[in-house]
Image (cartoon, grey):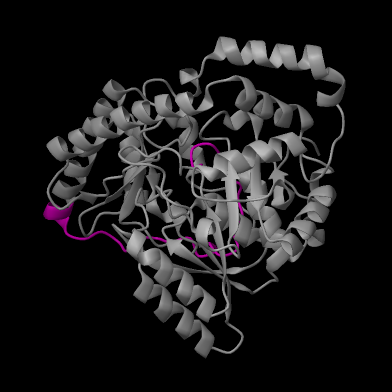
Amino acid sequence: MSGTTYDDYTASYAARAQGMTASEIRALFSVASRPEVVSLAGGMPYVSALSLDAVGDLLGDLVASRGAAALQYASAQGDAGLREHICEVMRLEGIAASPDDVVVTVGSQQGLDLVSRIFLDPGDVVVAEGPSYVGALAAFAAAEARIVHVPMDDDGLVPAALAETLERLAAAAGQQAKLLYTVPAFHNPAGVTLAAGRRAEIMDIAARHGVIVVEDNPYGLLGFEQSPPAALRGEHPGVIYLGTFSKTFAPGLRVGWVLAPPAVRDKLVLLNEAAVLCPPTLSQLAVAAYLETQPWQEQIKVFRELYRDRRDAMLDTLDDLMPAGTAWTRPTGGFYVWLRLAPGLDAKAMLPRAIAERVAYVPGTAFYADGTGAGALRLSYCYPPPDRIREGVRRLAAVVEAELDLLRTFGAAAAPHGDRDARLRADSPGPELA
């Protein structure tokens, strides 16, 4: 029955697969990819800023000199030389680590999947920032975990709210939280950074409740106005740390890593063998060669300046054009601005109008496991050039103003419609949400 939508296997799927659905937002992005649409949605790094000729020569030299090794199976833990380089990268964020405790993964997304499979049984509770990275929500949902969000403000995760949430969960039978998932530096999607004064307090709260902290740090080296923020893992060796080269080199190579205590590391290696046998050797050796032969820290400075200029273009245009009642974060690094609409507006319901006006964003509902967040949206400044960013914000401001006019004329519309099956949804995040 090729070409039909009939599914012969419906009765045979595992329970975890029954709730897997494609995001209803995704269909709109086939339209958003048209060249006339300014996409402020995608989290794609601007890899054209790399010296592509140098990267091409590097790859050619790698295959010519080490092709037999680069095209062969390798260790499930990852190439030893690459793991040494990873420790050098983490040292910039205040982490002193041994290569023995690093496990290379197929991007940090696979790290999230492996950590979820090690720690989470169906029904276990993961506490995560609200909003939270959509790929992490997908990984936790695939593990059939229950995700509980904790509010953030402009200084990151709110310690008092975290303590209240963990105490409330502990008081409920069988609801002890197992993991705290956090992106402390240049948060995706909120764009904020956890204040230095909150870090020790949050770690103390987690330790008091026996909660394992999972720190995801893809943007830590991409700050605009200061040295890289110190990673939580730097002072707390019990933290499970996720890193990636997707934002500072090339996402297409799919090279990430997990830094974990030895017992967890051993389980990560076993699961890696079960999942992929070994991470791709060619990609690993390509990253190692890049770090050995190219001025990679200078390249990161190029990225930082490029993204800072694009951030400035977005913030300046938001300041100039966005209607009153709208508020947004002012990131000091990373890729994203989190914009809160005036009360009564729904970013998810507004998206078709925005696409019709040739601008795209990601509604806030994508970043909450319970389908809330309709009053906010994520804007990305990493990929379009500054003039396109300004034009995109101009179009978006006009859409928001039109929605406000409708609200003033006709009053509040129907209540925002959340995804009733959000807890079970495990649709894989595409580049538009990364």
Q: Is residue 431 magenta?
A: yes
Judged left or right of residue 18, residue 211 is: left
Residue 112 place in picture, x, y as percent = 63, 53
Left or right of 156 on screen, residue 5: right
Instruction: Give the magenta-colored segment's residue range.
Output: 407-434
Residue beneath the point at 65% across and 28% down = 287
Magenta run includes residue 228: no
Residue 412 visible to the viewer: yes
Instruction: Give the left or right position of residue 292, taking residue 359 as reference.
Output: right
Q: Position of residue 286 (x, y in %)?
A: 69, 25
Q: Toward the viewer: 73 or 355?
A: 73
Q: How many marks?
A: 0
Q: In terms of image quadrants, where is residue 373?
A: bottom left
From what the image shows, is residue 140 above or below residue 217? below
Q: Position of residue 311 (x, y in %)?
A: 30, 34
| Res. 122 image quadrant | bottom right
Q: Name the spot of residue 55 as percent of width and height, x first.
A: 61, 16
Above or below: residue 276 compared with residue 314: below
Measuring 56% from the left and 35% from the top, which residue is drawn there? 246
In-front residue for pair 87/115: 87
Image quadrant where one finds the N terminus: top right
Please determine whether, in this image, residue 279 is positioned above or below residue 209.
above
Q: Is residue 133 left or right of residue 191?
A: right
Q: Residue at x 57, y 9 (%)?
A: 53
Question: Can see residue 370?
Answer: no
- Report the predominant secondary structure element of the magenta stretch: loop
The front one of 416 and 84 is 84
Of 419 and 38, the residue lying toward us: 38
